[in-house]
Image (spheres, helix red, strand yellow):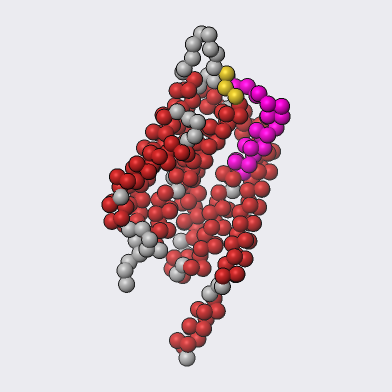
């Protein structure tokens, strides 16, 4: 009776396909709500975010910026609020992802929820900080160094913000590689042996990915993104070795 009741209990806790879709819908809504709240907060501090934080790399690189479109600055502030809102809501975003996949995990794995959400957030924000303090200053200085006395370098503000925001988001996403390795290893899809076997292929893929994630920027940004990606790949091998699903 004990075994039968346990099986019945487990089956009653299992979610059907429609229930999974409903759960996914609510998690997406909660994630979007978090982004909206982050956007509202970012909008109230938009002047500080734009003038003190986002324009700082341009000042360091001695870049001359100008707005070339009517209402360009309005749309620019909206874009900044949306992306900064997403960055601010990353803890909630990772929490909603965790809540969606948690039913498929064992009870002893669910207790790591706080640590995983925290580590995922730290990885993402670490990539953003790395891009802001390392990649962007070198990239913008490289771009501003070219010019002649007859040609003045005046950069469109929309292009400038497109570069810095895309680079920061790209760096944040690729810094999630160890967490991706953790999940794939836990479910048995990824193993250290596979990662070591395809190391050379992965390095080539990383170079292509770095070029794709830094569109419109110079090769310096691509190399600066590729180098930590390779290091993260090696770290991911260690993570996979620690958390690989043991065969029964």
Residue sitting at x 35%, y 64%: 245
Name the quadrant of the C terminus: bottom left
Tell whether position 83 is magenta: yes
Q: Residue furthest right?
A: 71
Q: How many discs mark residues in the rendered view? A: 0
Is residue 45 at least partly visible in the picture?
no
Q: Residue furthest bottom?
A: 1
State the extent of the magenta-drawn residues as a range: 65-85
Q: Is residue 170 above or below residue 247?
A: above
Q: Is residue 104 above or below residue 169?
A: below
Tell whether position 75 is magenta: yes
Q: Position of residue 85 (x, y in %)?
A: 62, 43
Residue 48, image quadrant: top right
Residue sitting at x 59%, y 45%: 86
Residue sitting at x 32%, y 52%: 195
Residue 200, image quadrant: top left
Chief secondary structure of the magenta span? helix
């Amino acid at each position: 009776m004990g075994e039968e009741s346990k099986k019945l209990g487990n089956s009653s806790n299992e979610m059907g396909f429609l229930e999974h879709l409903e759960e996914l819908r609510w998690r997406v809504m909660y994630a979007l709500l978090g982004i909206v709240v982050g956007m509202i907060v970012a909008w109230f501090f938009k002047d500080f975010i734009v003038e003190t934080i986002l324009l700082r790399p341009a000042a360091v690189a001695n870049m001359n910026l100008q707005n070339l479109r009517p209402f360009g600055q309005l749309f620019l502030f909206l874009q900044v609020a949306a992306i900064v809102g997403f960055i601010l809501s990353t803890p909630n975003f990772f929490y909603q992802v965790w809540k969606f996949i948690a039913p498929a995990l064992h009870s002893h794995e669910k207790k790591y929820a706080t640590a995983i959400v925290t580590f995922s957030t730290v990885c993402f924000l670490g990539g953003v900080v790395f891009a802001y303090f390392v990649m962007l200053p070198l990239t913008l200085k490289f771009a501003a160094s070219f010019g002649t006395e007859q040609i003045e370098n005046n950069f469109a503000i929309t292009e400038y913000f497109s570069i810095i925001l895309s680079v920061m988001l790209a760096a944040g996403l690729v810094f999630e590689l160890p967490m991706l390795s953790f999940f794939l290893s836990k479910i048995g899809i990824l193993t250290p042996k596979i990662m070591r076997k395809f190391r050379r292929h992965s390095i080539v893929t990383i170079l292509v990915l770095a070029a794709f994630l830094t569109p419109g920027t110079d090769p310096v940004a691509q190399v600066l993104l590729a180098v930590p990606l390779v290091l993260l790949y090696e770290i991911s091998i260690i993570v996979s070795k620690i958390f690989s699903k043991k065969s029964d």
